[in-house]
Image (cartoon, coloured by chain):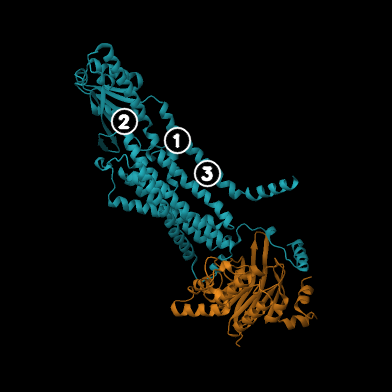
């Protein structure tokens, strides 16, 4: 038992180092704040939706429908002007203006479904952003049920099919100045999430694979004692850094492409059943947009590799290099989850700053931003990525000229003792002498 | 032989915090000379060699290699030196020949590079095994490859830390002969060793280093006479203890 305890103590002491703990603590703190952001969006699910209503019909059935809407939602506008309604909703944080057009009640009474006109004010394209529009869907279902009840109570002559489904919708979604007729926020968010899942996953895989190549390369150089030779060759330190980055990027990209081919087949087989032609809503990218996405992806990768190179400098051997890849993986996972769940524009400022500061965020959300012509965010992200990559590489080159690359955190006590007993005795004697 | 200075070290200090690994040493090495640094582990030999190989920065003092100042002209120094660390390795996924080609590419293109590789293969003397991956080599074979790597470029200064580390008696003797030959062809050699016999056989001059300071310097003959000893190991014990 004593032996086992001894080994456990040794293992814990060896593995539980500040280098292993600090990245985890930092990442836990970051994930905690991200959880608060998602939790905040989740609270939306329990909130009463804020809407506006316009009754252009003034029939008994339209009154019943609007009364039901009043019961289940917070109605901040009830008038006759669409523009006034939209302005009020914008001011009050509302998400939908529901118009009951003239002839609504008459159509139902003549055995046709009555049509609501819904003007959606979409706030973000993240999955969490569509929660409030789902609440409005529930409200509308309640209104339809109230109309059905009214028909059953007082107008039994109406066709039973219409009684069961007395209303249909005509939806228009307004988001970032784009007016998209015939589509709901839910459908747009669904399409965007599909995009938002694949792109961040590609970025994540490239970063993890290429990044671990760089860190492992540094760890292996140190473990195999080849780094010292490399550093005494007539080659500039910057060339060594760039050579290592480029080599790792090539290998990482090859591995990521192989991985993504497999994932591409997987996702296409899943999404093949429900294609949505987003081009007709103006949600497409042009050639210039694709160039921006490419630049953002390249700079994101470069930033990741430069960061990995910095971490690799502190790797003592291959094993410690493997541990050091974890912070990079976590750092890439944070924006991936955030981009899937949330929209950058609807996040609190702290969340926006946090995500913007992670260079991998920008290629992950570039496509989504460009679809809604948010060039400021994409170009700003590219400028930040370039600055981040440049500064990180400059620090890496600078550290390559310093002793730390070879000496690391080696302390005096870690020096080896001579094998020869005579020399060992002299060595110890020297160590005892005051300096 | 012209007695020109290859290495000039003045009051060299290398500190790690309050600990002086090298504590104000001064020495010169002449061109074509084989100069040995000997001392116990932790005495400052390897630190000195690493500084001269442009790997570590100096804390104070001055170092010149063939007239180039170490602090300001490290890139120039790297063009004329070759450093063989004690526990050096080679890239395990490369073959011995590919490793030599990788190194040679830094010193020349085309024919020059091919000539360097040819010389490296000759020095390594690994036969057909030169085409095998380094990971299949024994410790001795790897060391031979690394010695070949260090000497094939015909450096003006070869810095060799434990030249024959990991080699058996026969291989050690062969490598020592090779070092002598390289020196006679004009290469200056600065080496460190624990092997007193090796130092005595190879070196024109020796510096005894202990506790970061040079405690004695001279030819093996001079040191033996001065301390009335039969061999360098006895000189070392007498001087240091």
Q: Quadrant of the N terminus of chain A?
A: top right
Callout 2 environment at 10 Å: few (<14), some (14 to 19), or many (20+)?
A: few
A261 left or right of B2 in image: left
Callout 3 environment at 10 Å: few (<14), some (14 to 19), or many (20+)?
A: some
Q: Residue furthest bottom?
A: B1
Q: Which residue is mark 1?
A: A38
Disc on the earlier residue, 3 or 2: 3
Between tags 3 and 2, which lies in front? 3
Q: Which residue is mark 3?
A: A27
* Contact check, label 3 and label 2, Cβ < 8 Å: no
SS of the residue under disc 3: helix
Badge 2 sits on which subunit? A
Disc on the earlier residue, 1 or 2: 1
Badge 3 sits on which subunit? A
> Which quadrant would residue B213 be assigned to in this image?
bottom right
Q: Position of residue A199 (x, y in %)?
A: 38, 47
Q: Are marks 3 and 1 on the same chain?
A: yes
Is the residue A115 above or below the residue B139 in the image? above
- Chain in orange, by letter, is B
């Amino acid at each position: 038992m004593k032996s086992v305890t001894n080994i456990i103590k040794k293992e814990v002491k060896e593995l539980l180092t500040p280098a292993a703990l600090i990245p985890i603590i930092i990442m836990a703190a970051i994930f905690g704040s991200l959880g608060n952001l998602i939790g905040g969006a989740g609270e939306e699910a329990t909130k009463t939706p804020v809407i506006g209503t316009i009754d252009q019909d003034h029939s008994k059935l339209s009154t019943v429908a609007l009364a039901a809407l009043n019961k289940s939602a917070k109605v901040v506008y009830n008038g006759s002007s669409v523009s006034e309604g939209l302005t009020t909703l914008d001011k009050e944080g509302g998400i939908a203006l529901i118009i009951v057009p003239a002839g609504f009640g008459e159509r139902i009474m003549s055995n046709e479904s009555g049509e609501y006109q819904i003007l959606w004010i979409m706030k973000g394209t993240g999955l969490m952003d569509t929660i409030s529009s789902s609440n409005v869907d529930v409200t509308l279902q309640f209104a339809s049920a109230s109309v059905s009840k009214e028909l059953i109570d007082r107008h039994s002559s109406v066709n039973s099919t219409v009684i069961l489904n007395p209303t249909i919708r005509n939806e228009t979604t307004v988001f970032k100045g784009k007016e998209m007729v015939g589509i709901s926020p839910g459908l747009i968010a669904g399409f965007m999430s599909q995009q938002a899942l694949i792109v961040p996953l590609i970025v994540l895989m490239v970063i993890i694979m290429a990044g671990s190549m760089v860190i492992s390369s540094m760890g292996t150089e140190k473990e195999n004692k080849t780094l010292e030779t490399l550093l005494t060759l007539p080659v500039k330190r910057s060339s060594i850094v760039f050579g290592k980055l480029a080599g790792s990027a090539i290998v990482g990209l090859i591995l990521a492409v192989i991985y993504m081919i497999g994932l591409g087949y997987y996702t296409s087989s899943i999404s093949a059943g429900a294609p949505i032609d987003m081009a007709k809503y103006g949600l497409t990218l042009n050639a210039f947009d694709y160039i921006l996405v490419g630049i953002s992806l390249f700079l994101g990768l470069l930033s990741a590799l430069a960061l990995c190179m910095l971490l690799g400098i502190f790797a003592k051997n291959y094993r410690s290099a493997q541990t050091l890849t974890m912070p990079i993986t976590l750092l890439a996972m944070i924006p991936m989850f955030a981009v899937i769940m949330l929209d950058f524009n609807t996040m609190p400022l702290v969340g926006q700053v946090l995500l913007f500061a992670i260079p991998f965020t920008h290629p992950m959300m570039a496509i989504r931003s460009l679809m809604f012509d948010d060039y400021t965010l994409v170009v700003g992200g590219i400028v930040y990525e370039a600055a981040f990559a440049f500064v990180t590489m400059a620090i890496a080159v600078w550290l390559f000229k310093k002793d730390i690359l070879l000496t690391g955190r080696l302390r005096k006590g870690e020096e080896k003792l001579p094998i020869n007993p005579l020399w060992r005795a002299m060595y110890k004697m020297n160590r005892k002498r005051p300096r | 032989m012209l007695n020109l200075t290859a290495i000039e070290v003045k009051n060299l200090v290398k500190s790690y915090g309050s600990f002086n690994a090298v504590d104000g040493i001064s020495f010169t090495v002449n061109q074509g000379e084989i100069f040995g640094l000997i001392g116990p582990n932790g005495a400052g030999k390897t630190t000195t060699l690493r500084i001269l190989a442009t790997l570590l920065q100096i804390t104070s003092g001055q170092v010149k290699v063939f007239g180039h100042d170490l602090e300001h002209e490290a890139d120039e120094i790297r063009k004329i030196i070759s450093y063989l660390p004690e526990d050096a390795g080679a890239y395990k996924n490369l073959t011995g020949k590919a490793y030599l080609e990788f190194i040679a590419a830094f010193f020349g293109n085309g024919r020059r590079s091919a000539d360097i590789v040819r010389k490296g293969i000759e020095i390594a003397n690994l036969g057909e095994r030169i085409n095998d991956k380094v990971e299949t080599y024994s410790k001795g074979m790897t060391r031979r490859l690394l010695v070949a790597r260090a000497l094939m470029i015909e450096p003006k200064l070869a810095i060799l830390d434990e030249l024959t580390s990991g080699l058996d008696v026969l291989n050690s003797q062969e490598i020592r002969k090779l070092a002598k030959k390289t020196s006679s062809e004009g290469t200056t050699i600065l080496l460190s060793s624990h092997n007193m016999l090796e130092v005595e056989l190879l070196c024109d001059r020796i510096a005894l280093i202990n506790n970061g300071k040079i405690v004695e310097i001279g030819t093996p003959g001079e040191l033996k006479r001065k301390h009335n000893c039969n061999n360098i190991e006895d000189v070392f014990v007498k001087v240091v203890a």
